[in-house]
Amino acid sequence: MTEIILALDVMKKDKAVSIVQKAAPYIDKVKIGYPLVLAEGLGIAEILSEYKKPLIADFKVADIPNTTRLIAEEVFSRGFSAIICHGFVGHDSVRACVETAHENMGECYVVTEMSHPGAVDFFHGGVAERIAELVCEAGADGIIAPATRPERTAVLRSLIGNKKILSPGVGAQGGDPDAIAGIVDGIIVGRAIYESSDPAAAARQYSCFRTGI
Ligand code: O7M
């Protein structure tokens, strides 16, 4: 089964609540990042907790271990079930994020390679592969890898075994869910759902990947 993770990059609390309410039957988790949290505050997590969908904090943390730990502690104290950090920061920062997540019964996902065209400037040439190795050494729960480059995500899958892969880039960025769903544990979808005039119908289109039918 491939989970559907709603990327809730809207700027207003009411819109966020309305989208989650409509899409709820067809999604498994909600990912919240800087757009919504900077606009409405971290308290949005408590408001959305009513819908009983695990919340993933996408702050792509990229800092020294101490600051990483402080950020992660705050995230988990607000009810998030997972946090996302960058991997390029190195083993000690990633480990701080993983440890803090696990101390709080949460999960930590590490960005190994991004989905946008410019990601190839730095992540290719062995960097993403090294981050994938680091993810295994640090005991992270999984990685973020691109739906826009299924062949790259397949390479990363071969390096991380059965750790989870959450994959953004489906829909607005052109990633094909049929090409990626079979090798990942979750597809992250934002605009294709929250910009739709019918978010429930848009989310429902991805239901076949949840059931595997
Ligand atoms: O479906 P979209 O393009 O509207 O949204 C995709 C979401 O995934 C959005 O929240 C991005 O910030 C995020 N994302 C990427 O698009 N590409 C990446 O490489 C990584 C992420 C991400 O979620 O990183 C944790």
Image (cartoon, rainbow, N blue to C red):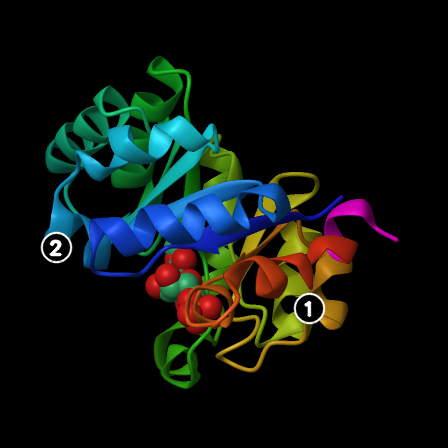
Residue ID at (18%, 48%): 37
Q: How crowded is mark 2: few (under 14 residues within 10 Å), some or many (20 or more)?
A: few
Q: Toward the viewer: 155 or 110?
A: 110
Give the foreground label among 2 and 1. 2
Residues marked 2 and 1 touching at CB (< 8 Å): no
Ligand 1 placement by image quarter? bottom left
Q: Earlier in the sequence, mark 2 or mark 1?
A: 2
At a point 51% along the width and 71% down the height, the residue shown is: 192
Locate residue 213 relative to residue 199 in the image: left or right.
Answer: right
Instruction: Please tell me whether residue 33 is drawn above or below residue 64 in the rendered image.
Output: below
Residue at 74 percent across and 71 percent down: it is: 179
Which structural element holds mark 2? helix
The residues colored magenta run 209-213
Q: Does the magenta stretch include residue 101?
A: no
Point 64% across, 51% down: residue: 159
| Position of residue 195 measured from the top left corner of the image (x, y, whole percent) | 42, 72
